[in-house]
Amino acid sequence: MSNEFNRLQKPSADEIESSCLPRGSVPVACHTAVPPFLKRDPNRVSPLGLTEIGMLDDEALTIAIQLETDRGLHGIVGEQLVKNGTHSLDQATRSEIEFLQFAVLQKIAGSPVSPSQVADEYWHQFILNTALYTNWCQRNFGQYVHHRPEPRSVLSLRGIPEASSALFRKYFGMQGQMAHCANGHDCHGNCTVH
């Protein structure tokens, strides 16, 4: 099922220059240089569905390439969603992509961001794989990314849902339904990253 789940063709290691700083066996704080061919090839599918505006943002493009390239390392999460019977293969793939889009926004926003409902479903499953999730966080963010549920009313007072929706529209041309969890986790309608 891993091969089915990870259907996207990923750039080869030679196509992406990386200046990751290794810490033990886990690369930390990776900063991938944006290969010039990505900006010049209008026929290339954008990583993780970045809009034209997103493709022009070097930081967003860099993290999107990095996260898309890393997808095969956490394919088991989508497999678990399918095995649990909560998602079809297509739903698990969509959930993974929206989670990675959320991760891009979290990295570039500089302020708290709320995930979409389907992104949050993937996040809940991913975080249960503690070693895998911790390593992914270290590789891509240089630190553990905490899942912090907060009441929607508190987030709304701080403008987080509206700002998150605007970022999703700007960078991915869509607006996911904001998260509200019904799977036993107490997310109070939203989850944020600080």
Image (cartoon, rainbow, N blue to C red):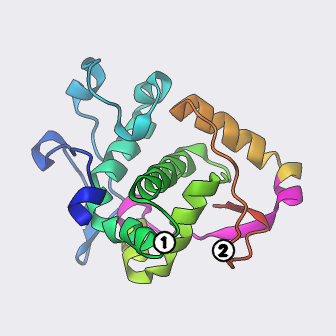
Displayed quadrant of residue 186: bottom right
Displayed quadrant of residue 151: bottom right
Would you say residue 149 sits in the magenta stretch? Answer: yes
Q: Secondary structure at mark 1?
A: loop
Would you say residue 28 sits in the magenta stretch? Answer: no
Q: Is residue 138 visible?
A: no
Q: Secondary structure at mark 2?
A: loop
Q: Which residue, given by chain and number where applicable, does mark 1 sit on?
A: 85
What's the mark number on residue 183? 2
Label 2 or label 1, whichever comes before in sequence order: 1
The answer to whether 19 is drawn above or below residue 172 in the figure is below
Residue occupying the point 41% across, 28% down: 55
Specify the amino acid type for callout 1.
Answer: Gly
The image position of residue 171, as x and y in percent, is: 53, 33
The image position of residue 185, as x and y in percent, is: 68, 77
Residue occupying the point 44% across, 33% down: 50
Graded by Cα atoms within 10 Å as few (under 14), some (14 to 19) or many (20 or more), the crowding at tag 1 reads: few
**Front in this rendered view, residue 188 or 148:** 188
Q: Which residues are magenta?
A: 139-155
The answer to whether 176 is drawn above or below residue 112 in the figure is above
The image position of residue 117, as x and y in percent, is: 64, 55
Quadrant where the image shows the N terminus: bottom left
Quadrant where the image shows the C terminus: bottom right
The answer to whether 1 is drawn above or below residue 169 in the figure is below
Displayed quadrant of residue 56: top left
CA gap, disc 2 and disc 1: 13 Å
